């Protein structure tokens, strides 16, 4: 770990950003050139004291998870993210195309969707980042660890993961999820994270084994989804996906037809999410 260079790199990238670059209001009395330390800390979901100590070349060695959060907060490119990891002591030639890095362009789009349910997911089924409105609609899908980070693993091992969908829609969702997992498994191999998910589900879930044995590929996600929210009831939403082929990630954006009851419910959830779930 190179503390001096790590601190310098973080400071220069922080000072190069403006509040508008990360979806924050500027404020009438703002005099700071670039982002404040506490703003970067809030975007990275860490304490301002912890981040300040990194820039001051003291404190504990940041974990890979912390560096990943900082890379997103500072809107780093892939090359900049790799440089950040090397400065943090995690040099690895194979790190250049890690699937958990969100492209800076995708993050800029997400910044402008703060009041819209939107999220970035990997090709193998992990949710990397959500807008507050998406958390209000679907729950926090980024809080899981281990194999449970994968939506397919949760679907077949945690019955509560299906609560947001009407019972009659669940068989179709299961087919779509398994087809997506098969594509990731074929692309990345049995020793990958998708491979570990498949191995665990084959050993523990008879239902998964049955769907997996059908060997379906290319099952399309329905453009219109029905979501059963515990507070506002049933919503019918449209899901549009912007796909980043280089990173094998998708930006999912949920909307509803204007003038419908679902549209009003989605607006209500967006307000709730923006007010209560914005990072502090």
Image (spheres, rainbow, N blue to C red):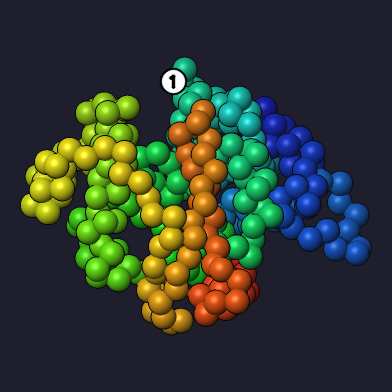
Residue 139 seen by the camera? no
- The image shows residue 34 at horizontal and vertical percentages of 81, 46
Tell me where residue 117 appears, x and y as whole percent: 55, 62
Q: Is residue 172 left or right of residue 9?
A: left
Above or below 63: residue 50: below
Residue at 50%, 70% in the rendered image: 136
- Helix, strand or loop status at disc 1: helix
Give the x, y percent position of residue 191.
24, 28
| Residue at image mark 1 | 94
Q: Is residue 198 above or below residue 263?
A: above
Write the residue at 26% across / 56% down: 172
Residue placed most toward the observer, 196 or 241: 241
Question: Can residue 256 be seen by looking at this rendering?
Answer: yes
Say which quadrant the N terminus sits in: top right
* Horizontal and vertical percent position of residue 95: 47, 25
Quarter of image, res 125:
top left
Residue at (56%, 26%) from the top-left corner?
82
């Amino acid at each position: 770990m190179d503390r001096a260079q790590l601190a310098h790199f973080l400071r220069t990238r922080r000072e190069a950003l403006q509040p508008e670059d990360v979806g924050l209001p500027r404020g009438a009395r703002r005099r700071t050139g670039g982002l404040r330390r506490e703003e970067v800390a809030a975007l990275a979901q860490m304490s301002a004291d912890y981040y300040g100590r990194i820039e001051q070349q003291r404190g504990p060695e940041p974990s890979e998870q912390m560096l990943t959060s900082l890379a997103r907060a500072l809107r780093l490119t892939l090359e900049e993210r790799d440089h950040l990891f090397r400065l943090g002591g995690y040099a690895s030639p194979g790190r250049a195309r890690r699937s958990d890095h969100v492209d800076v362009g995708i993050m800029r789009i997400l910044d402008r969707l703060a009041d819209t349910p939107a999220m970035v997911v990997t090709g193998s089924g992990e949710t990397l980042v959500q807008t507050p409105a998406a958390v209000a609609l679907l729950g926090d899908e980024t809080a899981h660890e281990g194999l449970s980070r994968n939506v397919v693993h949760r679907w077949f091992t945690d019955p509560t993961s299906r609560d947001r969908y009407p019972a009659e829609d669940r068989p179709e969702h299961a087919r779509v999820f398994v087809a997506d997992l098969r594509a990731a498994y074929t692309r990345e191999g049995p020793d990958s994270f998708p491979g570990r998910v498949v191995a665990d589900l084959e050993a523990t879930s008879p239902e998964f084994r049955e769907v997996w044995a059908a060997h379906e590929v290319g099952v399309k996600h329905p453009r219109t989804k029905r979501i059963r929210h515990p507070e506002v009831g049933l919503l019918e939403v449209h899901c549009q996906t912007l796909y980043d082929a280089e990173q094998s990630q998708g930006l999912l954006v949920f909307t509803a037809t204007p003038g419908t009851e679902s549209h009003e419910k989605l607006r209500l959830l967006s307000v709730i999410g923006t007010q209560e779930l914005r990072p502090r």
